[in-house]
Image (cartoon, helix red, strand yellow):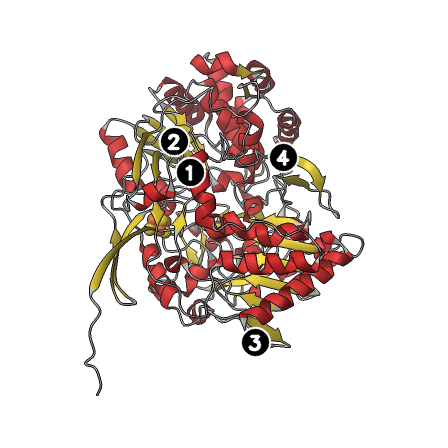
Amino acid sequence: MTEPATTPAERIHYGACNLCEAICGLEFKVRGNEILQIKGDTADPLSRGHICPKAVALKDIYEDPDRLRKPMQRIGDQWQEIEWDAAFDLVATELAKAHLRDPDSVAAYLGNPSVHNYGVLTTSGQMLSPIRTRNRYSATSVDQLPHQLMAYWMYGHQLMVPITDIDRTQYFLVLGANPMASNGSLMTVPDFRHRLKALHARGGRMVVIDPRRSETAEVADAHHFIRPGTDAAFLLGLLKVMLDEDLLRPGRVAAFTDDLDTALDAIRPFELAALAAHCGIDEQVIQTIARDFAGADGAACYGRMGVSVQAYGSLCQWLIQLINLATGNLDREGGMLFTEPALDLVNGPAGSKPGSFGKHHTRVRGLPEFGGELPVAALAEEIETPGAGQVRALVTIAGNPVLSTPNGRRLDAALDSLDFMVSVDIYLNETTRHADVILPPTCALEHEHYDMIFHHFAVHNTARLSEPLFDKAEGTMHDWEIFQAVGKRLAEKLGQPARAMPRPQQIVDLGLQASPRKLSVKQLQATPHGLDLGALRPTLPERLVHADKRINAAPKPMFEELLRFGETLRDVMPASAGLKLIGRRHVRSNNSWMHNSHRLVKGNARHQLLMHPDDVSARGLTDGSTVRVRSKVGEIRVEMQASDEVMPGVVSLPHGWGHNRSGTRMGIAEAHPGASNNDLTDEHFLDGLSGNAALNGVPVEVLAV
Ligand code: SF4
């Protein structure tokens, strides 16, 4: 007799979104394995009910028929499913073979989602450490490397990034950032819109400097266009005015800061007129901003992606630190503060490595290591160039460097020449199509999560552990199970001693208990909405990681960088000198794989090239037409939209598009291909100090098709 079918009961589940840095608390309504609703968790002490449209992508990814669930092996140009054990054996055998030939012949690349995923953060080393390669790369060097370098040099730890005290500041100066779309980056600030309203309600102001009138610029009190790649001139201009008008008052931090006067003396000789001409912002505007900033009762200067990924990204980040420090806004309420996360990777026994710089260099071009990683702009040449240490095997984890790193076409071709490639990834995308084996882990809703990194950058101290919404499907594996299985086999094949392989939750529990707040996983499990650990507060000098508990205001390499930049001031480009490409961010997009969510790509296309109407008519182009965009390294075709959102001389293209390569399996993305901005960016156009990719300010031509 057939049992009558029963409908599973509805249930409510709380968890945090790990798609971006904002860590929004979510409330899921679920029946069986069906997600009925996703909304913001109003009881979350950080996000207070906020979510963005990307949160629904969690449902789409969970249900996505394109998402891989079983290991895949490529035979020629065909893919076939294989069993986990066979896949692990194959991967361990090939990696061991490459390692025995030359440990540096195996490279690893970790994509951006790795840092949002505690399985990768805690256990990917269990797979990678037996390889002992120096060829380690990640998305850091196409993003925030200059921030981490300055944090390491000035405050002693790469995660000691000062955070805007957005809930109390009176003057918020934003460069190259769009928190209205991103909800903050290296400033975890869910619900930026309402926090900005509160800033305005208490009489505060926000001023935005950007070559594009972004969503954030739209709601600012003032927005000023700046020529791409010239932010260092604007920042130097601010300091110059503050110096000339005796506006600098570092206050209490001066007692534990070294060489601030030396740094400021190096800036004194710059001429405001030359700086203003270089960046394209009037002297009077720079003077007004400098005076308002220095005079505010709590001010914060914040520069993000647009400032980081440019030719003087490290110089910009140093100058931003100096502005906050010298005006007395570092380590004060309403200015920039350091966080005190529950799992504290900066201080105490749970602390991670503070950082390192230049301990070794890339083999071909000599680019410097930071924190054990090399700049990914060098990866293609390290694969192509014969000799000892040539990369012949590659491990990618949650990454799509073909779309996300400069001159992606060159890397695309280089990947084809590898002896072996394995990807730990849920999609067959533009990068993983080159793999020999793909090992797909479970998705975010199937495993627990604790955000180990972004609580370090949050505007309010909180802690939240998310339990899995669903059990993992039969026959699937979590990422840490994959790393442990391969790592164990690899160590055996290489004759290395067996290592302890704790689970992520054990590692997080130990980290929580060893941190100053002495919390535990058990306590966080008992508070599913998260714990409120209080507002940010002054923590210096105790929190500084330098042994002498002092701030180094003048890292030596910065003086050379300043001189180098001074040389460029002679090359003031007339507006007619050509077009410069910049990126942009949309609230419905973050990484390339989100383009396989129908709900995030439907409606008006969002991947067009934006171009100022004057530049459109000067070239005889037609608004809405497809154009050719050509740079030193490549050419793309893309729809162009005339828009005065961008300043004359600037064109803007978002990142993560270009889903028109053969052999991928992302049906929705392939139907909305767009074009990859990294087919235009140049792997030789870098922040000269750190090796971070300069993705903004790339010279391009735009031509009719
Ligand atoms: S802003 Fe959107 S994507 Fe980011 S954590 Fe919040 S809901 Fe998720």
Per the image, the residue denoted by label 4 is 356
| Disc sitting over residue 79 in the figure | 3
Relative horizontal placement of residue 94, taking residue 655 as reference (left or right): right
Q: Amino acid at mark 1?
A: Leu
Residue nearer the viewer, 486 or 160? 486
Numbered circle sitting on residue 517: 2
Q: Earlier in the sequence, mark 4 or mark 2?
A: 4
Give the vertical position of 696 relative to 596 (above or below). above
The amino acid pointed to by label 3 is Trp
Disc 3 and disc 4: Cα gap in Å?
41 Å
- Please tell me whether mark 2 sits on a helix, a strand or a loop: loop
Residue 641 appears left or right of 530: right
Residue 23 x %, y %: 36, 46
Q: Residues within 10 Å of mark 3 (few under 14, many from 20)?
A: some
Q: Is residue 74 above or below residue 501?
A: below
Q: Nearer the viewer, residue 292 or 302?
A: 302
Q: Are marks 1 and 2 in contact (CB under 8 Å)?
A: yes
Residue that appears at 40% across and 52% down = 19
Horizontal and vertical percent position of residue 102? 76, 54
Q: Determine whether the residue tagged by mark 1 lies in a helix, strand or loop.
A: helix
x, y percent for residue 108: 62, 54
Residue 183 higher or lower than 332, as above or below: below
Q: Contact, CB < 8 Å: mark 4 with mark 2?
A: no
Q: Amino acid type of disc 2?
A: Arg
Structural crowding at the residue carrying mark 4, measured as other residues with C-alpha within 10 Å and reported as few (<14), some (14–19) or many (≥20)? some
- Neighbor class of circle 2 (other Cα within 10 Å; few <14, some 14-19, many 20+) is some
Numbered circle sitting on residue 470: none
Say whether disc 3 or disc 4 marks the residue closer to the N-terminus: 3
Q: Secondary structure at mark 3?
A: strand
Q: Are marks 2 and 3 in contact (CB under 8 Å)?
A: no
Q: Earlier in the sequence, mark 1 or mark 4?
A: 4
